[in-house]
Image: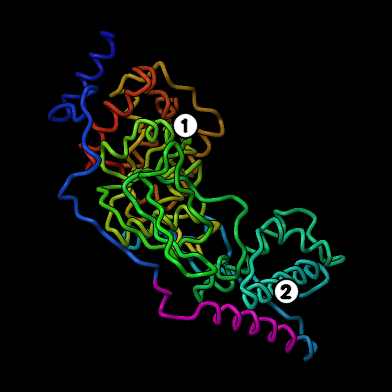
Amino acid sequence: MAAKKKVVKKVAKKVTKKVVKKTTKKTVAKKDAKKRTVGPAEKIGKKDLKSVALISIEEVATEVLTEAKKGRLPQMSMPQRNLANVTYDPKKGFFELKGNMKTRTLDVNSVKTFAQTLRLMSLAQDMVGDDDFATKREAYYVSKNWGEAKFNEQRESDTVLDDIEGMFSVKDVTREILRFVPEEHGGSVVGALTVIDRDPETGAEIRSDCAAMGSGAYTVPSSVDHLGFETTAEFIIAIETGGMFQRLNHHRYWRTANCILVEMGGVPTRATRRFVRRLAEGLKLPVYAFVDCDPYGICNIYRTLKVGSGQAAHVNKRFCVPTATYLGVTPQDIIDFGLEDATHPLLPVDIKRAKDALKNDPFFQSYPKWKKALKQMLTMGVRAEQQAFAKWGLNFVIEEYLPVKIKQAKKFLP
């Protein structure tokens, strides 16, 4: 107990006083809290993206047929999808493609992949026209009727699908527009937020109050641009682990702090990232990321939330949250909150990931504060989980850590 008081006193020197006490709770929200509202997302450039998708598919197929009839080898070009082919401009806030392309030519070595690409485009054409959809897993199984063109593994169909999306991304056509949806659902959401949906059959408005989910939470659907939102919240916390999300929800931290909690569950899905992006952009809410202090949490989970990834650079401008900042856990938190004996040694894969980020990742190279933090982690040689704060008590993270950190939001890592 004496050790805990010593740690709290040490942290308190950096803020005016403790923000939350064990014996007091704030009201649900400030009575004068301003309600903010945003409707469904506007279509990019007012385009009918359904028509754009159908036209794009027809154009590629027509070009292939025309070249074949002329006795030439048809080609399809698409962006190279890797970290080496991206740039990062902090003013724009997301990874962009440099422009390096790869060309798929119909020859003896590529005939199967070429055929698979055309067959998936044909499937997309049917689904867009019929207003149907397929999960990525279903798309893989549909190919079992394609004879020698069938996929042997789903990762093969996923790769071809990503290539197709890359081809059409210049026209703002995404995988979702092509009617391919992921198998997994989006993250969970609780707090001062009302989500406004529509009944797909009747068009009737459906309102989901994320503060009235009992012990559960609202689940982000695979597509979110048709949703509207209302909130009185002051900020959003995007949380890496389900366990920490459950603790904060169980103790109604979102009520105490008047915020919205979003469970990422590891690297956030596209739907989760788009959902948080719409909240941040449409409702003008700051987004704080709360993840483990390890290279994976920082260099994969947080980086993907904020600026996207090299693999998805062709759609990052829609599926990332450039305004997000890093609340923690940071390497310095390990020291400031006395967690040295609640850490784990960095594994070789952790060390490699951190060094690769420092050497090759445009995002971390753009911020001296991040380079310093990653180097500090490597020097310390340890990583810490969100749950490490339980050393000082199960609810230390609610009663001490988050209030202290949020008081210093302007000092968060970029």
* Pointers 2 and 1 in contact (C-beta within 8 Å): no
* First of labels 2, 1 by sequence position: 2
Q: CA distance from mark 2 to mark 1?
A: 43 Å
Q: Percent x, y for residue 256?
A: 26, 36
Question: What residue type is disc 2 on?
Answer: Leu
Q: Percent x, y for residue 36?
A: 25, 59
Taking depth in this image into account, of 232 and 225 the one nearest to the observer is 232
Determine which quarter of the picture holds residue 105: bottom right
- The overriding secondary structure of the stretch rendered in magenta is helix
Question: What residue type is disc 1 on?
Answer: Gly
Highlighted range, magenta: 42-67
Taking depth in this image into account, of 127 and 31 the one nearest to the observer is 31
Front tag of 2 and 1? 1
Vertical side of 338 occupied by 331: above or below: below
Determine which quarter of the picture holds residue 119: bottom right
Q: Residue at x 40, y 79 (%)?
A: 45
Vertical side of 325 occupied by 4: above or below: above
Q: Secondary structure at mark 2?
A: helix
In the picture, measured across the screen, residue 70 lies left or right of residue 34, that is: right
Q: Residue at x 23, y 30 (%)?
A: 25
Taking depth in this image into account, of 159 and 2 the one nearest to the observer is 2
Residue under label 1:
243
Q: How is the image coloured?
A: rainbow
Q: Secondary structure at mark 1?
A: helix
Q: Residue at x 49, y 73 (%)?
A: 172
Taking depth in this image into account, of 176 and 196 the one nearest to the observer is 196
Vertical side of 159 occupied by 386: above or below: above
Q: Percent x, y for residue 305?
A: 43, 50
In the picture, measured across the screen, residue 170 lies left or right of residue 60, that is: left
